[in-house]
Each structure stands twice: as structure tokens, then as C-alpha cells.
Amino acid sequence: MNGKIRLAGLVFAFVFAPVLLGATGYAEKGKGPEIHAKIGVISILTGPGAAYGEAITNGFKLAQEEMNARAGLRIDLVIEDSSGKQEQALAAAQKLINSDQVVAILGPTLSTEMKVVGPEANASGVPIMGTSTTAQGITQIGKFVFRNSLPEALAIPASIGKAVRKYNLRKVALLYGNDDVFTKSGYDTMKKVSEEMKLAILTTETFQKGQADYKAQLTKIKNLAPDAIFCSALYEEGAVILSQARKMGIAVPFVGGNGFNSPKVIEIAKGAADGLVVATPWFGEKDDPKVKAFVAKYEKRYGKKPDQFAAQAYDGLTLMAEGLKKAGKADRAALRDALAGIRNFHGVLGTFSFDEERDVVMEPAVLIIRNGKFQLFR
Amino acid sequence: MAVDWLNPYHLQVASFVLINTLLGVSIYVTLATGQLSLGNAGFMSIGAYTTAILTTRHGFPMPAGIVAGSVVAALAGIAVGIPSLRLTGVYLAIATLGFGEVVRVVFVNWESLTGGAVGIAAIPQMGRELLASLRDAGFAPESIGLRGNQFISLSVFLILFASTLCAIGFFFRLGSSRVGRAYAAVRMDERAAEAAGIDTTYYKVLAFTQGAMLSGFAGALFAHATSYISPADFTYHRAVEILVFAVFGGSEHLLGPVFGAMLLTALPELLRSVSDYRYIVYGILLIAMMVFRPQGLIDPPLVNRLAGKKAAGGGSRDAA
Amino acid sequence: MFAEQLINGITLGSIYAIVALGYTLVFGVLDIINMAHGEIFMFGAFIGMVIVTKMNAPLAAAFAGAVLVTAALGYLLERVALRPLRGRTGVSHLAPLISTIGVSILLENLAHHIFGAGNQLFETPFAEIRFTIGSTTVYLVQVVILAVSVVLMGGLSLWLARTRSGKGLRATAESLETAELLGVDTKRIITATVVIASAMGGIAGVLVGMAFNYINNQIGLSMGLKGLAIIIFGGMGSVAGAMAGGLILGLSETFVVAYGSSGYRDAIAFLTIIVVLLLRPQGLFGRAAPEARR
């Protein structure tokens, strides 16, 4: 009789222990050195931005495997779809924070989503790190908001500055996607930098997401004969613009923003991609064992080269792991403090620090595409 | 804690269900006279932008902003509704679809007013504002056993719930009033209605304006619930989504769009694992509904059966 | 610059015109707007892309494949989303509009799952052939596109006016019941119309791929909405109106960019819809004021 009860108790404990553990999620296990952390991911799995979400979640998953292969840390990812919409991102964040009780959130993908999700996570005391949010005013949302993605405000002055010095640019044409936050804020920075450098802006042209035909804008630009075209576009549109421009006989260099920087540009535009200058946190050809190992592993797993979205995601989760190790426990507040203290972290993006406002401190590399390959622009 | 079950995530989903319910009803109201408007995403954006601009830049209090948003949307509704009178059926649907797109393009391009694609951020969020003013008055949510974020989500939900209830109540009563009977008559046969002495022009514009106003109201609430808006929130896909609510739930009874919006907003949240296929399901739903049950899941006979009445109920259009 | 922009505008306009022809044919016969036409066109472009770029087959095969697949899609559309609604009592005139919106969302998202989210390269050596007149470069593709649109328009007009099946089609358009009484197999005519319109969408899809070198699953929506604007502008059901409307829209979009602001480019189409519907609801070439179709 007694034995039966004990057996029942044992069965009960076995069945419900995982449930209880799962429910409390981030609570300390108490025993053993292992930290068990549940981290939420908000990404775009459906809709027009799904190409970005795919690279990002690939990066997370690869980093997760590596972290879990080591002793002392176990990370579970809870991945939610936002399909690029604010309210879905917010609903996903609410679910992660309150139902899944995650210790931290990675994502969301877009700056627009972060502007909705960030305040919520901040108010709930959950560290949140954007790995692809590059617009201004992201980490200023609150002290729980981080990012490891190179903001346009750092990337664009670097690439424009180098291009102006190297090519002695005087007059330029601006071209940007005006219905997208990312490309629009990239354009704002380009315009500001151009004015500061006293470049003559011959014309400013816009395009819209998913457009197939850029010939009207490009013909106009061609006839104004600029020294270079500053183009704030995501690679999807950017590659097509490059291809149509080169076909039309526009041979001047293109300077792009952060979102233009992807191996996919070469894949889509082929030879036409030559002459594109971008500043980037991520350079896949870097002579660094960490970078090489990451590229090889990623390529083997997913059959393509990692782009910056994948690389930033990969480093984002690694930073989280670093923070967890420093904090010594899967606790939201402790993790925030640990993350905020990270300086000179060595990841695939290079040497990385958070500044006082939890924003990015790093030296972007300026790259140019030559002979169908990204090379350091010297 | 006593109220740990009160999950802000669930309240958040419920809040979006309510906003979508208002949008679903807004398309229903216009349809009550037989006019299909696909411009409700445009009216919604007008409401949202009006209150966002007034509250963030001109210091309007939030309730005034929401009222202003609804009124401006209603004025836009009149401006579109009157010239659209000569259009019927698919022509009206396409013209209003075009209107929605024009509004969006204007919001993208009118940067000095709307911030362009970047949108407007830091719009006062109703829950946070309420909590802040209550805190000033010496009230702490902890005193009733709620965490701060629980209180915020709960108050957003309750405000939206009250607003939605009022709106539904209003249109429910409208349905059985003289106006509602006139709507039904116009929908059944416009010429016959006119011959019977009903001012069809007046009622058609009225229904159009009411739909626009309700969309604007929903948009204003949306702005103050998410605290950030941009033109990307009000695309063609939003218009289609609103249409799906009414078509799926039922466009012949007020409870149809209410039910449709609730089910279709909550369902993808519950089935997040299949949310990859959300729009595929939407597409199939639209086709299947038209083929098998064009009046939608809920129609007046069903409501009457459920209510146990033989005579047509209050909200039924067939009452006329 | 003017000559180049003129060519850009005519190329864009010709493509718009072919897309619009598909709409106008279906509307002319069935009195419904096929909201899925843009997505069928997009499928045609993707099928052409797969055949040309992935399988390295010749261009003719791409046209054949795209036409086959889009024709099949048109047939399915008719069977699944249109025929069940026809002739049923109590079905609102808005039902086919809504069911074809359903088909369009379905196809757009299917294409996303099948072909991926991003831009796909549409590579064909034919698209590289060019010649120079003065300082202006003209691509052979641009000439072909214009030619195809003119041929399709002319062929369609002749077919409608001269052939027996074309006459049957017009009779069906006039009145379904009367045509049936006169011994016209209306069911077959309607199916044929939707299939032919869809196949024309397929041709337009391959032409877009050749002209712009890239396609993605969003072009169906943007081209579809433009096509819609054109038939309203040109007059619903009017073949000449679709052609003229397409060219006018293509040219005005191009010249707004060339001499104005590119930001409002996409608004032109929709503004046109609104203005035309308000001032001249029957459109440029419309037959008569549209009756209250209820």
C-alpha cells in the first residue's frame, strides 16, 4: 500500500517535474552548474520579408547547437512568427514574456516592430536584443533594449567617406525605397552625410517595395551623369537596380546602406554587382578562424553562404550565452546587467562592445564587390 | 499572486480581436445598403494618423484625439461617399480599393506631416497613460494584486471592450430602427425603395459615412493600443483581411463580422505553428465560403434558430 | 533622354496592356472582375523562369510552359471559384469578386512557398540583343513586347468580330439566357474565355521576365492592380480601351518619374481609377454608362 503510494508519487514527479520546470522556465534549477535558459525569438517566417527571417533563424539555430554542445549551458529557443507586422510581433512578444516566460528575446526583425515590442519588453523587465534593427533610436527605448546590428548611422558615413576619398566624388544621385522604414532612414543618413561632405545632389529618386521596373528612374539618373549613385535599398530590390543600371550602361560606383550588403546581391545581379560599395559589420572572407569555421558550418548546413543577417543573429545568440554565463543564472535582471557590461567581445562580426546606451561599438569594414566577390575596399 | 492567470499576452490578442471586430462591423454597416467598400483600411489609417499627429505634436488629450480621428474619417467618408453614389457593385469596390491605396501613397510621401515610411512612434499608449495618471493620483496597481504590465494590458482590453460593446449596441439598435429598415430596403431593391419614398441617396451616404467613421475609430484605437503606426499597417492586405472577417462570419447579420473577426484573429494566434499558412487558409476560406455559404457562417435564420424565435430578430435585415 | 523614356514607357505600357486584356476579356463576357488575374500572370512568369533559367530550355519552351500552366490555372479558377456561383439564386453579384480575391491570396502565398520570397533571376540570351539608333539603345525584347501586345489586341478584336466562336462569345456577353436559346454552348464559351484570358496572362508573365530580368511573388499584386485601373480607365470590356489605357498608364508613370517626382508613381493608377469613375464611369472607350449591376 505504502509502496504503491510512493510509486505513484514517483510517477507523478516524473510526469509533472518537466511541466513545472517548463512553466517556471527561467527559474533557477538550484543544483548543478548548468544554466537552463529559454530564449524567445521573434522573426519573419511568412510574408514578403520571410527571406530575412530565414537567414536570421538559421543563424540562431546554428549558434544554439554550438552553445548546447558545450557544458554548463542549455538554451532552448521558442521561435515565433511576426510576418513583419507590429501587432503580430507584439502579440508574439506578449506570449514569449508571459506564457513561455523566456529569460530574454532576440529580434524582432524590423525596426518598426522593435518600436512596438521594445517598450513592452522593457516595461516587463525582459532583455531584448535586435539583431537586424538598424534605425535610429532603438536602444534608447529603455534600459532592457539592446542591439548588435550595425546602425545605419555608423555604416553609411563609413562607406560614403571611403568612396568619396577614393573616387574623388563631387556630384551624386540618391535613390531609395520610400515605403520602407529601413531604406528611408538609410536615405536620411545618406542625405545628411552628403550635405556634410558638400556633395552636389543631382537628383533624388524613389522606388517602392517589390517593384520590377526601375528603368524610368535609372534613365533619368544616367542622363544627369553623376559620379556615383547612393542607393538605400534592401538587397532584394538593390540587386535588381544594379542589374538594370549596368545593363543600361551606368558604370559609376554604387554606395549602398547596410541592407544592400548580402552575398545574395552577387547571386541575383551576377557580374552587374561589381562596383557596389558597402560598409558592413560582417565580412565573410575575413582571415579569422572564427569566421571561417562559421561560414563552413553554415554553408554545410543550409547550402548557402551566410549573409550579415545570419551572422548578426549568430553573434546575437552567442552574446546572450556570454551574458548568461556572466550572470551565472537564467534571470532577466541579472542577464540585463551582464549584457550591458559586455566589452570587447570577439565574435564573427569582429570585436564588439555595447556602449553606455546598449548600442553598438565596432569598426565597420568597408567592402567593394569586384569580380563577383566582396573584397575589402582599400 | 492571486491574479497570475491574468496573462497580458492573452489580453493583447483579445484587444486585437476587438479592434478587428470594429473593422469587421465597419464593412458590414456599409454593406447593409448593398455597397461593398474596400477602402476601410484607408479610413482606418486616416483615423489612426489624425489622432497620432494631434496627440504627439499638438498636445491633444487622447480621448479628443480619438474623437477627432473618427470625425476626420467620417468627413473623408462623406467626401468619398457622395461622388461614389453613381457607382455600384464592383465599380464601387474597385474605386474604394483605389482610394485606400491613394491614401497610403500620400501618407508615404507627405513626410513633413506623417514621417513617411518611418511612421509615427511614441504615440501615447492608453494603458500606460492611464497607469501614469493613476499613479500620480496615488493609486498602485499592486494594491489590487496586479503587476504593472498586467494592469496596462487589462485597461487597454477593458477600454476596447467597452468601446466595441457600445459600437455593436448602437448598430444593433440601428438595425431595428427606421434607418436600419431603410438600409435593408435599399439593399433589397434600390429602385423599389426609392419608389416607396425612401431617400436612397441620403441612406447610402449615411451608411458609407458610418462605415468610414467606425473604421477611423478603430484606427485611432489601434494607434493608441500599439503606440506606433506606419503606412505599412494599412496596405491592400489589411483591406482584404477586413473583408475576410465579414465574408467568413457573415455579412447579413451584425453578429457575423463580430464572430468572423473574433475567430480569425484568435485562431492564428492559437495555431501559431501553422501561421506559415495563414494567408493560404484565408484564400481557401474566401473561395469556400462563396461556394458553399455565401452569406457567411452566421445568417439571420441561424441567429433566430439559436435565439429560439420564429420571427426575425432585432438585428436582422430581413425584418424589412 | 526623351526617346529613352518614351521606349521605357511604351514597354511598360505594352505589358500593362496585355495584362489588362485578360481582365477585359473576362469582364466582357462574364461581367465579373477576376481579381486573381494578376497572380495567374505571376505564376506564368515563374513557370517561364523555371524553364529558361533553371532548366536552360529555349524561350519558346518557356512560352509554351507558361501558357499551359496558366491556362490550366484558368480552367481550375473557372471550375472552383466561378462556375459554382453562376446562376444560383441569392448569390450576390459581389460573390465572384470575393471568391477571386480568395484565389489571388491563395496563389500569391503558394508562389511564396513554391518559388521562395525573393527576386528570381530570369536569364535569357534573347534579352541581351540590342541595337542603337542615334544615341538611343533599343532592346529587341522591347520591340517584341510591343509587337506581341498589338498582335494580341488585333487578334482578339478579329476573333470577336469575325469568327463563329467569337460571335458566340459576344452573344454570351450580351445575354446568357438568349445565347443559350440560340444554341450557343455558353458553358464552353465561358470556360474558353477564362482559359484564354489566363493564358494571355501567362504570355505577359514571360514578357515581364524578359523585359526586367527579375520576378518575385509580389508582381502579381502590383501588376494586377494596375491592370484593374487600366480597364476602368479604358472602359470595361473594351479591347481597344485596354490597349490605349495600358500605354497611357505606362507612359504617364514613366514621365512622372522623368520630369516629376517618383514618389507618386504608384498613385497615378489609383487616382486615375477614382477620377475616371467619377467623371466618366464608362471609361474612355466604354460602350454605355454601366447600369446599376446589382
Image: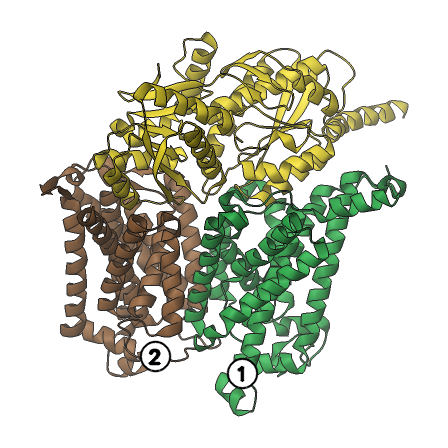
x 25%, y 27%: residue: A271
CB under 8 Å between discs 2 and 1: no
The chain letter for the residue carrying disc 2 is C
Apparent side of residue B138 relative to residue A339 in the rendered image (left or right): right
User: Is A55 in front, or is A276?
Assistant: A276
- Point out which mark residue C289 bears: 2
Q: Nearer the viewer, residue C100 or A341?
A: A341
The colour of chain B is green
**Which hue belongs to chain A?**
yellow
Q: Position of residue C114 (x, y in %)?
A: 38, 41
Q: Quadrant of the N terminus of chain C?
A: top left
Residue C89 picture location, percent across and down: 46, 77
Give the numbered dot on residue A85.
Answer: none
Percent x, y of residue B73? 58, 63
Residue drawn at 46 percent across, 62 percent down? B99
Give the CA distance from mark 2 to mark 1.
20 Å
Please give the chain letter of the residue carrying mark 1. B
Q: Is residue C68 visible?
A: no
Where residue A202 sits in the image (x, y, percent)?
A: 32, 38
| Above/below status of A205 relative to A309 | below
**Residue lying at 77% horizontally and 14% vertically, measured from the top left:** A31
Return the residue at label 1: B200
User: Which amino acid, mark 1?
Assistant: Thr
Chain coloured brown: C
Q: Tell me the amino acid under the disc marked 2.
A: Ala
Name the image quarter holding residue C180.
bottom left
